[in-house]
Image: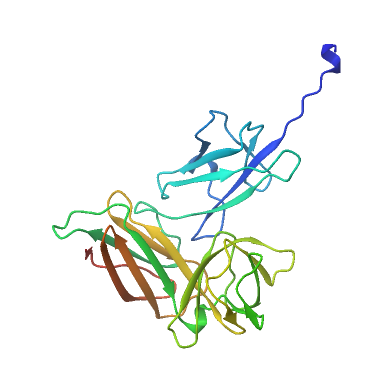
Amino acid sequence: MTRAERTFVTRCSLVVRPIDIWTGYTPVASSLRISLAETDRKPIRTSDGSYAFLDYPGDICNLAITSSTYLEYRREITLTDNGREPPILTVSLLPNGTYVPPSAETGLVVKICDERGDPISGARLSAYIDDEVAVRGRVAEEKTDGEGNRVRISPGNGKLMPGDAFVLRDREGTATDWNVMTELHGDPSILILERPFNRKWSRGTRLLPAVRTESDKSGTAVIPFRGLMPAVCPVHVEIVAGDRKFTAVWTAEGGQVIHLPPIRL
């Protein structure tokens, strides 16, 4: 085969779509470093602002997204076989304590400390808002457990985006189920889920906005909520650090980022 007859085929192996969980937009490229642990090859930018890794030779890779204003993101990814569509991974980037909140957004900021007052990094926080104004949708099927990792909903007062977490809660307030919307279906009323639900849910069950995050190196945890929120709303919070657990119901205010007193575990 002569040099003129040689053909080089470039294959897209993985597409990463980072989204600022607070704004819903892709951060500027200069604020992020996106890499795979197994290669020094940098991704290319696509027309929609995503990052594409080309011609990765392996079946498994370890993605890392680092930034000065977002929490570090790491995940092991299994790639598809040759000839199939490459995985498109939407990543909701969570702010750390140095992030400057956007105007008119809703959130809480709190520092997590131990009994001596020293900051705790890596404390896990789960939080959701339980208020009618904040409902992001309602289950539109008679009964569903998210079989096939999808659910049909009727729209609420806000819109879920790929990468958003949400909580299902029954009318009695006794049962909850966490999940993440991974992608939109061609039908906007169908959500693609990270996993099936833990139980069956009835028509009309509410989808509530939720966040799972952790404290940064300074012990600061930022809980961001995007979109329309009521003027005053209850935020159900659980904090876990090792064998220590803290639960509370805090109050958020729509369009305000509130700094709370430090929490000692």
At which x and y percent is residue 60?
57, 39
Q: Is residue 161 left or right of residue 250?
A: right
**Which image quadrant: the N terminus?**
top right
**Is residue 121 placed above or below 13 in the rendered structure?**
below
Residue in view at x 66 percent, y 65 percent: 148
**Which image quadrant: the C terminus?**
bottom left
At which x and y percent is residue 224?
43, 64
Residue in view at x 60 percent, y 73 percent: 145
**What is the basis of the colouring in this image?**
rainbow
**Is residue 124 placed above or below 44 in the rendered structure?**
below
Residue nearer the viewer, 223 or 192: 192
Any part of residue 118 in sight: yes
Residue in view at x 28 percent, y 59 percent: 241
**Hey, which residue is sitting farthest left in the picture?**
116
Residue nearer the viewer, 172 or 3: 172
Any part of residue 104 in sight: no
Q: Is residue 124 left or right of residue 143?
A: left
Q: Is residue 219 left or right of residue 254?
A: left
At which x and y percent is residue 21?
50, 59
Image quadrant in which you'd find residue 58: top right
Residue nearer the viewer, 105 or 119: 119
Residue in view at x 52 percent, y 41 percent: 63
Q: Is residue 181 left or right of residue 1?
A: left
At which x and y percent is residue 71?
41, 50
